[in-house]
Amino acid sequence: MRTTSYPALGFLSLSMFFSCQSDSPPFSQDAQEALSTFEVADGFTIELVASEPLVADPVAMEIDEFGRMYVAEMHGYPLDTKGSGKIKLLSDTDQDGMPDQSSIFAEGLILPTGIMRWKEGIIVTDAPNVWYLEDTTGDGTADIKEAMLTGFARSNPQHNLNSPVYGLDNWIYLAHESTVSTKFFHDQFGGEGQPISFPGHQMANLPVNADGRNVRFRPDSYELEIMSGETQFGHTFDTWGHQLLTSNAEHLFHEVLPARYLTRNANLGLPTAMQYIPAYGRGVEVYPITQNPEHQLLTDVGTITSACGVTWYQGGLFPEEYQQVTFVAEPVHNLIHADVIKDDGATFKAERLLEEKEFLASTDSWFRPVNFYVGPDGALYLLDYYRQIIEHPEWMSEEVNQSGALYNGTEKGRIYRIVPEGKKLDKFLDQLSVGKATNEELVKLLTHPNLWWRRTAQRLLVDRKAENIEALLVKTATDTSSPEGRVHALWTLQGLEQLDEETISAALKDSEAGVRENAVKLAELHLEKSPTLLSKLISLEEDPAPKVRFQLLCTLSGSDKPEAQSVCEAILQQDIADEWVQYAALSTSKPESVWLQFAQEHLTVSQNEASAAFMKKLGNQVGRTGNSSAIHDMIQLTATATSSDSWWRAAFLDGLAQGVHTSPNPGSQLQADKQLLIKNITPNRPDDLRKASLHLLAALGDLPISAAQQTIKEAKAALSRSSSSVAWQQDALTFLGLVDATKYQDQFMATLTPQHPTVLQKEALKMLSNVQGVTPCNALIDRWPSLTPAVRDQAVDVFLEEPARMHLLLAAVENHQIDPSAVGWRRTVHLMNHDDDSIRIAARKVFTSSDSGSIDQYRPFLSDKGNYEAGKLVFERACATCHQLQGKQGTAFGPDLSSVRNRSKDAILKDVLFPNQSIADGYELWRAELSNGTTQTGIITSETPSSLTLTDLAGNKTTVDRNAINHLEALEYSAMPEGLANQITEEAMNDLLTFIKQP
């Protein structure tokens, strides 16, 4: 669970502000006139389906088996929680194929975010509940309203649960993510949620707010599961059931490893189960065509900041190449972005469908695409929220909040459909009879080229508990020419509990890789009652499709049979370059020694990066166990090496050190192993093994001094011998620091001369950080004039080890002994946010002036004539410690600043000067107190069922096990305090904003 309600991280405010600042009245287009504002990809046309007054504020739609069109209307966005949400039924009374009448199916909803047909009614997501609504009287109005699930947090509206989807596997999937509570609207959106449950049933419960991850459930059997990924608004599936997700500025993720595999091994240490798949990186450029008479100051080229409604097209109407295309709505830039999805090992990669152009864009600044729906006619239906402003006031300027424009357009809304030119569409609205089809007719529909028909037929068959069609389904699953039909038939049989071993065995031999992959999943579900399926799975060891092999590895990693392990080993050896394959192999609950033995024999024949990476993951996993016996065994197996095999042994020991660092330290029980590691601290051992041994010794701590005397002597000699290699001298410094930093501080200080290489001076300073008291810091202040800039940067860290040293640093800055620029932006932020009140107050006094800066001070200097190159230098000095631009030029701690390019300089400036007014989604600062006595602080950049990853201000990532967290809390202050902007002059600020805004 992640919730917060405290100030911003300065630049971290990714406001999607795009409202007018004009005195002119708001300008919107009539629905018919709006059609002329669109530019759509060649070969397509866009048609108006419905508009106000039939529909307003549409966010989701569903078409049922009778052709009835349901639309979810969210009128309350962004602040109204009084129950203005509705579900509309759109009807076609003149049978021309287009709706001409609407009625209210349900009202009194708070902020409805999704809709799905279920049984005789519909499912609606509206936090904190998932509702079931049904009309039992036939009057067109729901008279049943029952909570199916409850407990979800009502947070900022665009972060609430949404988009129920009936999956290929007969589960209902819900899009969901962590809460992002607001500072100014906490009463409405400050909920943290409750344990997720079926009301009145205790058969299944999930953690509070499902730990901020996606959820799937089966209402009839009261099954409820948490997923390994999370998404903001919308999610989608490909033909074979792979789930794609989206989140604001990062528009396409793939959930690669499901939660059921991750929970097998609590020590896996996987930082995230999702893969960001765009091959063209982050900070994705988009190409709007918006004409803006309201002076919204959009740039010609912007970046994705509001991705939502991701949809994989499977309608069968578009040209064949579009079967591998996903569409993402981007309401900020008034466009639809499209990607071609290609296989890439266990996951995918996405490439632009069109270069320097979007699939659809509008010149109308009120056009707000938010979602899609692929209809029974194969058309791509587009939901246009049509608002002047589509953002929460938390992230907008006060001028806009007070302008009265927040709800402009709430009475408007449009639904369009996009179709290939020249295609005549079948009428379906209120004219379908799929709900009355026989079971045999529904089975035939499983092979339809349009997913709507396949999914609807499967849902109806499973819901009916259809009888006497097993033979027909088996024939469809094994003998139809449609691979899509075959896979739907398989899962329909599974949903009806009629799938047998023979049919699964046949599917494992299917000519289509996607069918085989799903057959492996189905075999996994049947292994317990049909153990002979194991031999059929083993026969797929050399399957030509990477995703089939990956699924086979995931499935067989849960088996305790030796023959299954052999297949897992073979797949790992073949596909080891794929990092996801490495994690899938390690997700097993088998002892790590099994994999180490195999790796030694088969993965270390020649040095390669993939095998080294696997060894490091394996070592990390052992270290995370905190099991002294297992760690002892692994050290004994890996700590001795020759020059030819030190590469993989060093990688393993590095991973072991990393794992030990995040777990209860077993070092006191490993004295003999430390002695073995100390033997590697000599000049005649390979550099990589020596350094890795030092890392592990540092993690274990409490060195056996009596056994280290000879090594101490050699290390001291190395520092006085000019013939010693720099690498050995550096490690000698490290070793002496581990033995007793205070005792050897004179050796460290003696290294701080211009005659010594910078790398040695930096290492000496690292060791001085371990010396108790302020003596080293006083000496550094005295030597400060002779330290080079690179060395000074490291020297500042020595002052940050304890409060007394920090006060000494602040005094030195105040007394002009150390220049503030030497402290650096990141460390200035750290000091100004320190837990110790005295340090925080002193730092804010030293680093900020009495005047915290004002808009009026800087505004006269804002112009279009800023110096781009000068601004780049300001960015590198003041921003790059926390931010990047398009995934480059800095540290990925805060949001990528390319996301604010579409905003005016004035709007960006306000966030720089007043960072405490808002915070970007997902960039809250957290502190985790761990069971090993350490504390980690940073933003939570990823989560899995068993771990979470914290990224600190320097961009360092630490993955910690959930069961190793004693306490986790959101900090009550911003990571970028007000006043830091005072270190930037007025002219430099204009240059900086010029650099940020220019593509």
Image: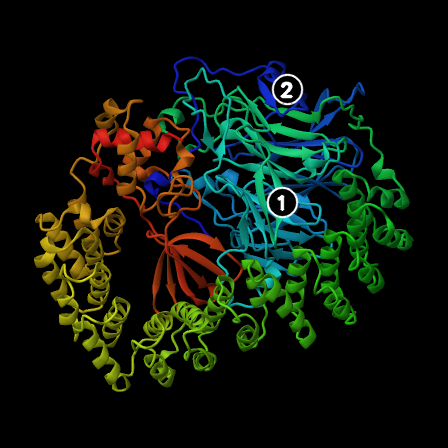
62 w.r.t. 349: above or below: above
- Image location of residue 314, percent across then percent down: 71, 38
Q: Which mark is residue 896?
A: none
Query: Would residue 209 be found to the left or right of residue 485 on screen?
Result: left
Q: Which residue is tagged 2?
A: 53
- Image location of residue 695, percent across then percent down: 35, 70
Alpha carbon separation for disc pair 2 and 1: 41 Å
For discs 2 and 1, the disc positioned in front in the rendered view: 1
Q: Amino acid at mark 1?
A: Lys
Q: Can the viewer see residue 742? A: no
Q: Residue at x 29, y 83 (%)?
A: 704
Of the residues under marks 2 and 1, which one precedes in the sequence?
Answer: 2
- Image location of residue 17, percent across then percent down: 42, 29
**Which of 874/981 is in front?**
874
Q: Which mark is residue 342?
A: 1
The tally of labels here is 2
- Image location of residue 49, percent across then percent down: 69, 22
Q: Residue at x 41, y 71 (%)?
A: 650
Q: Can the viewer see residue 417? A: yes
- On-image quarter of the C terminus: top left
Task: Name the secondary structure under disc 1.
Answer: strand
Q: Residues within 10 Å of mark 1 (few under 14, many from 20)?
A: some
Q: Amino acid at mark 2?
A: Pro
Q: Hey, which quadrant is residue 750 in on the image?
A: bottom left
Q: Residue at x 31, y 22 (%)?
A: 864
Query: Would residue 659 be found to the left or right of residue 601 on screen?
Result: left
Query: Would residue 534 be found to the left or right of residue 17 on screen?
Result: right
598 w.r.t. 825: above or below: below
Query: Would residue 485 be found to the left or right of residue 156 on screen?
Result: right
